[in-house]
Image: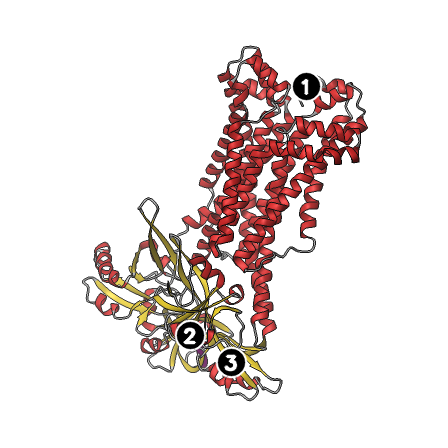
Amino acid sequence: MTRLALRMLRHRPGPAVATLLALAAGVMILMAMGTLVESGLRHRPEPVRYAAADVVVAHRDITISAKDLDGSTVRSTVRLPEGGTVPAGLVQRIRGLAGVATVAADDAVQVALPATATVGTGHGWGSAALTPYRIVDGSAPTGDDQIAADRRLGLAPGQQTQVLAGGVARTYRVSGVVDGPAPAVFFTDAHAASLSPHPGRVAVIGIVAAPGTDSAALAAAVRGLASESGAEVYTGADRGLAEESDALGARDLLIEAGAAFGGYVVLLIVFVVAATVGLSVRHRRRDLALLRAVAATPGQVRRMIMAEAAIVGLTSVALGVPAGFLATRWVRDQLVGRGFVPAGFPMSDGVLATVAAAVATTLVAVLSALIAARRVTGIRPVEALGEVAVEPARGGKVRLVCGLVALAGAGSSGVVTLGAGGQTALAGAIGMLYLFVTAVGLLAPWINRAAARMLAPVLRTVWGSSGYLATANLKANARGAAAVLTALVLSVGLGGSVWFLQDNLERQTLAQRRDGLLAQHALVSPAGLPPGAADEARKLPGVSAATSVRRTSVVVRFLDAAETVAAQAVDGTSTMDLRVRDGDLAELRGDTVAVSSIRASTHGWDVGDQVEFWLGDGTPVRLRLVAVYERGLGFGDITLTRETVTGHTARDADDEVLIRSSGAADLSVLAGRYTGSEIVATSGLNRRLADDLAVSAWLNRLLVGVMVGYAALAAANTMVIAALARGRELAVLRLVGVTRRQAGRMVHAEQAGLLGVAVVMGAAIALATLTMVVRSVTGEPVPYVPPLGWAAVIGGTALLALLTTVLPIGRLLRVSPIEHIGVKE
């Protein structure tokens, strides 16, 4: 049957080419997405900072356990945003183990050198052996006023230099110059401990084994001591996981982005490929029925269909894989250029992603073809010939029931979205979008017939006799036009909802930040500001209020998983208006917390509740909720007191001090007190935020653009196939007296009717989805749509529909009807 399949494809090039394009584009997208995820999963960072250590003890992530519906235990692991710490006393306990040659604690302190405009890290000299760093000039520091500096910092032994640590500037003498893998400065161990943002705890403990020691036995012994404090033991290649590096952040980004959008993209590709292949087979039912009539068995016809789909699928793989390599390379270059991924991050060769994409698309094509041809291959030959001559008056009951179930599911998701909030509402709204599109696809025959009856007066009035023919044709070919309607609704629905969501998030974040900032100026420093900076600002004449702000993140439980949530720690809220909805921010002191309305809705928190989560270093806290506010996008979902996070952040310094003042206040005096700091207008902070949002939104726009673009390709393919399949129909009309102009007007009327129905339904679905998502994420009842947004979506869809229908139909009408009367397409 393979030879016959090749001949059929050669004589029916239109559907084959359309199917090939859909499959090749699917292979390219799946391969590019899969390669990014595969690269993240395969990446194992090489140990650099702890390359000389045999065993590393650290607390880098937290695992949360929950019970699933079936009673099984589900575990979710999330990396701690502030790194995590272990007790410093563990160093002495490990030192007493047999086989330990060297044990050192490492607790990185963020530092800045104003003389060289360098921001880096400071460490205790004892941790230099874990890399190792070696002295190339001078000697190791021996006093609290000495440092050893990396040679790349341009300092020499005996030189005096200022170092900012914890927002405080101190003058040190360079005792020696060291050489190592990254710029760093080294203090004495005692002085480094005094600068630590979390006294009594350290970030990492590194152990160097004595010669001849069994590394596995030593690791087991260390693990027994470390487990008491919740720390983990890293050995071998896993030592790189204990280091804080850009590569680890890139790895998590690739995995999270692929997981978040991969599922939606796969569903979209399956939906598109199934619709395209199904429509292609549907328009060839006459060929299949004729094969049955000349004694081909159902099994032979099915094998032929499978061979056709497999041939097209394999050809699409041959085209899609090279395109996928090019797309992956372009995406990688963009990620590196925009700072999402470091330049040296190793990308996978994509072998597994290529195989998975090829198998998935080919399998979907084969199964879709078999499902589409099941009716012709499942009935007697004479009945098959009769069915393809006249479309059945009724659709399948199974399709109707499934469509109604999908519609009910969409309605249920809408109810959940309206009754919930936060992340639950977001998930419900996205699910509602796909369920609505699925329902439209299943119920399209009934929708088309109903629309034809409703539009009949309009079509007849505008197009006259051609409108009458268009109405009759829409009713008679309701099932044939189902795929066209579905593709158009999908394009409008995705383009009008998912694409505009990013605009709403950026707009609301900036609006909340701008409207909520009551301060006119801010004191900022790249190395942070000491806790007393806000008090100094309040003492200046003309300053009415000052608030220190420290940005951090916390880990909260969400369903059976954990997620990282942006937070801020403040010593007051007099310089910001968070728009409190319930409670009172004046009570924010001690062991209390305020949360955004979206976060409160997500978890069902109310004022007065004791809420539980983990600070950025993994410390569990139980705080009393005193206020719920609405401006969570602009200021973070969680607002804590500075006392709560002290000792639990990566640096003991504030990010900024917000200042409300009159015009007479001389804030330059304040900047002069803190080396490296400056006074900036809060409008400048908002511009920086806008730039940061634009960079971070690029990846979302890229992935959403892929989805919308593929939906548009599906619509174009579907409409071209449907148009090219009408050659015999148009030939019959012209032979019975319909002029070419009347036939063309009839097609225009049909397209206008279908397009109108698709735009109305797609816009309604998009508007409902966008409204619910925006309401759940931003709290705004009405979503923002750019002035030309809807015009671009609707106009682009209309232009796409006209081009992919008018041009093929025009080509068919230019050919003599005698040439098309004997063929189906």
Tell me the SS state at disc 2.
helix
Amino acid type at mark 1: Val
Q: Earlier in the sequence, mark 3 or mark 1?
A: 3
Q: Earlier in the sequence, mark 2 or mark 1?
A: 2
Task: Provide the residue designation for mark 2.
Answer: 642
| Quadrant location, the C terminus | top right
Relative to 818, is 187 above or below? Answer: below
Task: Provide the residue designation for mark 3.
Answer: 546
Can you give x and y, in whole percent of width and height, for residue 571 in the image?
45, 77
Q: Which residues are magenta?
A: 161-165
Q: Nearer the viewer, residue 274 or 739?
A: 739
Amino acid type at mark 3: Ala
Q: Residues within 10 Å of mark 1 (few under 14, many from 20)?
A: some
Residue 334 seen in render: no
Q: What residue is shown at x 58% (from left), y 86% (from top)?
A: 666
Can you give x and y, in whole percent of width and height, for residue 385 in the image?
60, 15
Distance from Cα at disc 2 to Cα at disc 3 = 14 Å
Residue 539 seen in render: yes
Task: Provide the residue designation for mark 1.
Answer: 823
